[in-house]
Amino acid sequence: MIRLAVIGDQRVKHSLSPRMHNAVLRQEGLEGSYEAIPVEAGQLGEFLRGLAGRGFAGVNVTVPHKQAVLPFIDRLDEEAATLGAVNTVVVKGDHLEGGNTDCPGFAQALIETGYAAKGQPALVVGAGGAARSVVLALARLGASPLWVAARRPAQARELCAELGGEAIDMDQAAEAVPEAGLLVNAAAVSSPAESPDMAAWVKALKVPSLEQVMDINYGREQNFWADLARANGARFSDGLVMLAHQAALSFTRWTGRPVAGARFLAALEGAA
């Protein structure tokens, strides 16, 4: 019997992860369950220290706990150490191993689109926690030049100093976009209702060389990044693809069974 979960604040109740993981557990013939558990910040250490005693093989970690769990982790993998964030905890006896599958999950999602990033100009919009995994993945894939634009330029400069890329402001980004073959939205907004200003900025972009647009968000009925791709004849994918791939990588770490991200995506789309 394998017990798994995703932890976060109250928003975790709306997570799509249980749907994916429970579907794949059934397909693999594994007895077990994956649940969504809200954990208050002040209870985080106690919860993590009690994972083994409650029979957990591991948990995913989502906002706002990805950095907060670090003091309670015994060993970090390379991605987690570099990013300073954990999204996957593996229980090994009394020890907790922390990993981050967001970076390789994004890389796999991009590769699956057929876009070859090596040596090609790429623009990332956003410089928060989510952008860190995207920038690290693109730097490792060899995107060049790799621009990182944010409404707070200092945040973009700090990110690039740590992980690579060239920090630019939003005005400079609008000038750089015509050269980019890949645009990734790693900011929190994707619909006009969330940010009329960003919607107007995106609508004004001229991107003749654009081949691929990726939005790490999902679930928006209106999405101005998708509109941008459609208007310029580019391919578009949203955050569900990245979510599926990072989930597959976490699942493998817990169970030892390699499972294709496409199976997790199928579960999200109701085809599993």
Image (tube, rainbow, N blue to C red):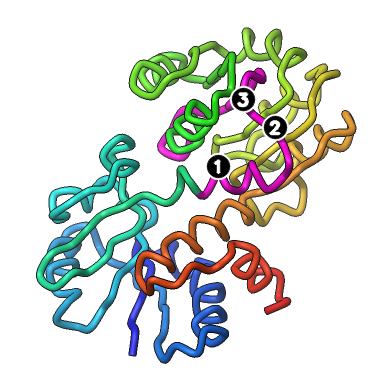
User: Is residue 130 covered in magenta?
Assistant: yes
Which tag is nearer the camera, tag 3 or tag 1?
Answer: 3
Quadrant in the rendering for residue 11: bottom left
Q: CA distance from mark 3 to mark 1?
A: 12 Å
**Residue reaching furthest left?**
94
Q: Are marks 3 and 1 in contact (CB under 8 Å)?
A: no
Which amino acid type corresponds to the residue marked 1 in the rendered image? Ala
Which amino acid type corresponds to the residue marked 3 in the rendered image? Lys
**Which residue has dot 3 on it?**
118
The mark tally for this picture is 3
**Which residue has dot 1 on it?**
107
In the figure, 153 relative to 49: above or below? Answer: above
Which tag is nearer the camera, tag 3 or tag 2?
Answer: 3
Which amino acid type corresponds to the residue marked 2 in the rendered image? Pro
For the record, the magenta segment spans: 105-131
Q: Nearer the viewer, residue 205 or 85?
A: 85
Q: In x, y percent, where is residue 227?
A: 82, 38
In the figure, 194 relative to 4: above or below? Answer: above
- On-image quarter of the N terminus: bottom left
For marks 3 and 1 on the same chain, the one whose residue lies earlier in the sequence: 1
**Which residue has dot 2 on it?**
196
Q: In x, y percent, where is residue 209?
A: 82, 19
Label 3 residue SS: loop
Q: CA distance from mark 2 to mark 1?
A: 30 Å
Q: Indicate left or right for 191 with 76 as reference.
A: right
